[in-house]
């Protein structure tokens, strides 16, 4: 068996959540999860709102297909992140409108694209480093994203969109949504004086929130 039906159902729920929260349009966006040494991912040219469990593709960590279903063309991005981030169990990648708009700004801070405008963002996103532009299908993106993923759970691909790794597909969707909302806030505030949280407060909130999550998983 290449992926359990529970894994497939979990991934389909996350794919539908991405669509329901308007984080993807058309056939953009892809979602994956790690099940043992397999990666289950949404197929190419699929609408996340209607994808079915038996349509999902399964790959190994090197990107070699384990089923007949054709994976998303961006599967190489997912496998690169999983290879360099062993703790990652799920990945969401979207072209969500506001996050993608931010990814096209000229003056992005390379190590952190968005300021910590709210506590909710600070609790979920430790930093949002920017990955240099690569054309669709350019395998160099795997090296660049893999390098960033070793130390960061979230990143913003330049002129493209966000990538989020997390412990569960549902958590990855939540973080992708938080990035989208904060990108929207950031664009609303652009040109005005912003008062983001201090970096100390951001670190405190992130640590507290993640300690709590770890305890609730083990408690
Ligand atoms: Zn993409």
Image: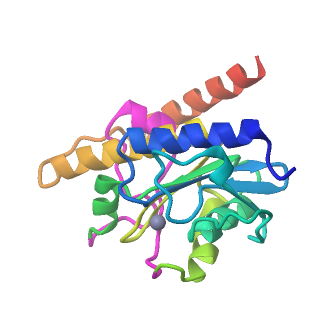
115 in magenta: yes
Residue visible at 55% across and 65% down in the picture: 44
Residue visible at 46% across and 76% down in the picture: 132
Q: Is residue 86 left or right of residue 16?
A: right
Residue visible at 46% across and 54% down in the picture: 47
Residue 74 sits above or below residue 126 on the image: below
Horizontal and vertical percent position of residue 140: 59, 82
In the image, the segment drawn in magenta is 106-135
- Residue projecting furthest to the left: 192
172 in magenta: no
Horizontal and vertical percent position of residue 56: 65, 54
Q: Quadrant of residue 38?
A: bottom right
Q: Is residue 161 left or right of residue 166?
A: left
Residue 178 sits above or below residue 112 on the image: above
Task: Using the image as rendered, state which of residue 129 and residue 3 is in the foreground.
Answer: 3
Residue 192 sits above or below residue 151 on the image: above
Horizontal and vertical percent position of residue 24: 39, 52
- Residue projecting furthest to the top: 219
- Quarter of the image that includes the C terminus: top right
Horizontal and vertical percent position of residue 48: 48, 50
Q: Quadrant of residue 62?
A: bottom right
Residue visible at 48% across and 37% down in the picture: 174
For the question of whether residue 168 can be seen, the reply is no
For the question of whether residue 71 can be seen, the reply is yes
Task: Using the image as rendered, state which of residue 84 and residue 77 is in the foreground.
Answer: 77
Task: Using the image as rendered, state which of residue 182 and residue 71 is in the foreground.
Answer: 71
- Magenta-highlighted stretch: main secondary structure? loop
């Amino acid at each position: 068996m290449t992926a359990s039906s529970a894994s497939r159902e979990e991934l389909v729920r996350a794919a539908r959540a991405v669509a329901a929260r308007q984080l993807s349009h058309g056939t953009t966006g892809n979602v994956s999860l790690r099940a043992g040494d397999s990666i289950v991912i949404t197929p190419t040219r699929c609408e996340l709102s209607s994808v079915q469990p038996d349509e999902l593709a399964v790959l190994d960590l090197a990107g070699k297909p384990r089923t007949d279903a054709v994976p998303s063309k961006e599967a190489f991005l997912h496998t690169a992140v999983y290879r360099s981030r062993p703790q990652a169990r799920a990945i969401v990648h979207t072209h969500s409108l506001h996050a993608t708009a931010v990814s096209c700004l000229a003056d992005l801070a390379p190590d952190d694209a968005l300021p910590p405008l709210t506590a909710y963002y600070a609790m979920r996103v430790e930093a949002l480093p920017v990955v240099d532009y690569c054309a669709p299908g350019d395998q160099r993106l795997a090296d660049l994203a893999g390098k960033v993923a070793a130390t960061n759970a979230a990143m913003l691909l330049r002129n493209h969109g966000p990538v989020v790794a997390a412990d569960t597909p549902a958590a990855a969707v939540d973080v992708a949504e938080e990035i989208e909302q904060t990108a929207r806030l950031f664009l609303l505030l652009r040109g005005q004086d912003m008062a983001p949280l201090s970096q100390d407060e951001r670190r405190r909130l992130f640590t507290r929130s993640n300690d709590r999550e770890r305890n609730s998983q083990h408690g």
